[in-house]
Amino acid sequence: MSEQKQAQKRFVILISGRGSNMQAIVNMAKKRDDIHIAAVISHKPNSVGLVWAKEQGIETAELLHKSYPTRESYDEALRDLVLSYQADYVILAGFMRILTEVFIEPFKGRLINIHPSLLPSFTGLDTHERAIVEGVKVHGCTVHFVTPVLDVGPIIAQAIVPVHKKDDADTLAARVLTMEHQVYPAVVDYLAQDLLSLHNQQVEYKKPVTTLFVHPDIG
């Protein structure tokens, strides 16, 4: 008897601008029968990423935060919109807004973010500049579950890159981005295959998977 076909997982991706991580995820998903990108949503008008997603035949939506009087009222509208797509997982891919519990709670254990540092180091903004100022030898990115406390959710996977003496924030950011485009699609792959889940604020893996991605310049 043939193995039962893996059930298709539905993903909604939230972006702000060009959505390069979204594009990396979509390009991976095109090769898979078990991943459906149900929608790409932006809180900014005329996002380059939305144009690209629409060209791929993906449903898109603009939900402009400036149209709402409070952060909570926006999050309520965003919550309802995402729920309408019946998403199994919600992926934040460069979504530059701090979300409140109004949005986070309904998607507990199903809301994923990528942060451009090796958490718990350099939470918040300007991570690349701060890494250079601090003189760290390695930097990177972290994919994690989202909790109401910013940038402290349980870590799923990380990628590391070297920090070179001649780096500035832009060159370091570009190096980190190449690894983001590897680690984030990999995590979406794991989720689609039900290889990991969140229990009692701990990430549990059903079988060994790669959770540390290393830039080729690191020996």
Image (cartoon, rainbow, N blue to C red):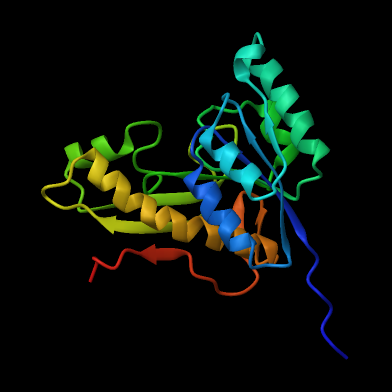
Residue found at x 78% / y 71%: 6
**Residue 80 appears in view:** yes
42, 83: nearer the viewer: 42
Q: Name the quadrant containing residue 208.
A: bottom right
Question: Which residue occupies the extreme top position in the image?
Answer: 69
93, 23: nearer the viewer: 23
Q: Is residue 49 left or right of residue 85?
A: left
Q: How many marks?
A: 0
30 over 1 or under it: above or below = above
Question: Which residue occupies the extreme bottom position in the image?
Answer: 1
Picture quarter with the N terminus: bottom right
Residue found at x 75% / y 50%: 88
Question: Which residue occupies the extreme right position in the image?
Answer: 1
Q: Is residue 196 left or right of residue 133?
A: right
Q: Position of residue 70 (x, y in %)?
A: 64, 11
Q: Position of residue 54 (x, y in %)?
A: 65, 42
Q: Position of residue 77 (x, y in %)?
A: 74, 23
